[in-house]
Image (cartoon, coloured by chain):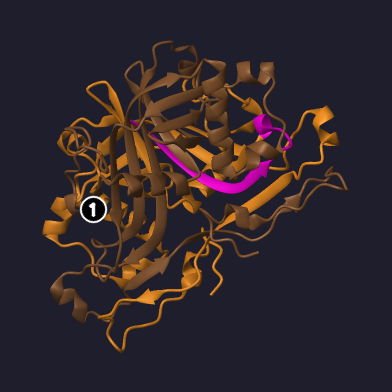
Chain colours: A brown, B orange
Amino acid sequence: MNSYTATPRTRVRRLPKRAVYDKAQVHAILDEGVVCHMGFSHQNLPYVIPTLYGRVGDTLYMHGSGASRTLKTMAEGIDVCVTVTLLDAYVLARSAFHHSMNYRSVVVLGRARPVREEGPKLAALQAITDHIVPGRWDEVRGPNALEMKQTLVLELPLTEVSAKVRTGPPVDDEEDYALPVWAGIVPVHSTVTQSIPDERLLAGAPQFDVRRLARRARATP
Amino acid sequence: MNSYTATPRTRVRRLPKRAVYDKAQVHAILDEGVVCHMGFSHQNLPYVIPTLYGRVGDTLYMHGSGASRTLKTMAEGIDVCVTVTLLDAYVLARSAFHHSMNYRSVVVLGRARPVREEGPKLAALQAITDHIVPGRWDEVRGPNALEMKQTLVLELPLTEVSAKVRTGPPVDDEEDYALPVWAGIVPVHSTVTQSIPDERLLAGAPQFDVRRLARRARATP
């Protein structure tokens, strides 16, 4: 299966031409993002928290340390909506109405469950750490028993998934093309330019090459 | 009142030293962001959608055109959680556990209501448009009657509000400072470098100065 199957909940109704269900595209968006926004309901009220995440195949892992008490106390899992949004450009049209953004976003629906077994939990933490910087897990001290206990990891199968993608120039009403207004797009990039070593860095420690973050950020070292 | 009052729902329990309730700081984060993530519950399940927004004083306005049918059909408003997150740096520690991000995020809780009256709705749309590019509203064709009808605007009072801010270097366990691992932070910037004029731009149309986006993106024209 190279595509996710649209469900009543993930079928994109608004501007369906922007809908993407292709797995490779969905995975690429998830892998390029840094932070997801995870929504859940508690006592029938919505909450949205930003958190780090990682992906292994068709499973998303969310780091729960920044999550609420609600998440920590659940045993059977919790229904979530995890959204990852990448901004690509400001879209400036000739009319206010047609202003927009070029973006790529993924919405994942489903039940997130805590990962409790040590092996899978370590693998999930590796995915989350390596999602920040590829290969980082092998360079740093791994979690000890206390840290493992203090860390909440949620797993969410990539089953009910949809993406929306907008690209290209503004689309104006035909008569508005005669207006002497600047219109076009302004690309926006997530850029890393330098690394700032910790003050207590050992003299013999290796350098850090910011191009390792280039997967998601256009590094200009 | 220069600060928001913490409520049981907005009191930051996890890492409370990162909590910020100061209005000026909250407003600055909201004004620097481009897209918010709005969460709501529908049939007891959570949804999180990215959308454009704008702020006027202590009211947030969300653009609802990308929103679901759920939002469009509500009359009495809907409980939402609107979260805006700005990433400032990757925080690379000597241990996997202490990896983090420097970030500034705002969470707004409350009941969002559709803005129906023409005057307030126009003012809200101006706020949303000018949030994309300051001053843009006065340069472009304003919405006509049909566009006004097609556009959903939600208003959310900034009442239950909290922010979280992490800054500074990684904080490692004391014994880990002896490890020969690179540690430090890698700042990430949202950068605009060029504008791409629409193919049908009139020859006499004014230029666009990308520094107008500098409020939120470090413009390097």
Q: Amino acid at mark 1?
A: Arg
Residue B160 seen in this snapshot? no
Q: Predominant secondary structure in magenta?
A: strand
Residue A98 seen in this snapshot? yes
Q: Nearer the viewer, residue B131 or A101?
A: A101
Q: Residues within 10 Å of mark 1 (few under 14, many from 20)?
A: some
- Residue at image position (35%, 52%) is A104
x and y, in percent, of residue A11 in the image: 19, 39
Chain under callout 1: A
x and y, in percent, of residue A146 in the image: 68, 16
Tell me the element at label 1: helix
Magenta segment includes B84: yes
The magenta region covers B80-98
Q: Relative to A108, is B50 above or below?
A: below
The residue that label 1 is drawn on is A18
Q: Is residue A177 left or right of residue B35?
A: left
Q: Nearer the viewer, residue A8 or A89?
A: A8
x and y, in percent, of residue B9 in the image: 46, 22
x and y, in percent, of residue A201 in the image: 83, 44
- Residue at image position (62%, 26%) is B16
> Where the C terminus of chain A falls, by quadrant?
bottom right
In this view, the residue farthest toward the right is A203
> Where the N terminus of chain A falls, by quadrant?
top left
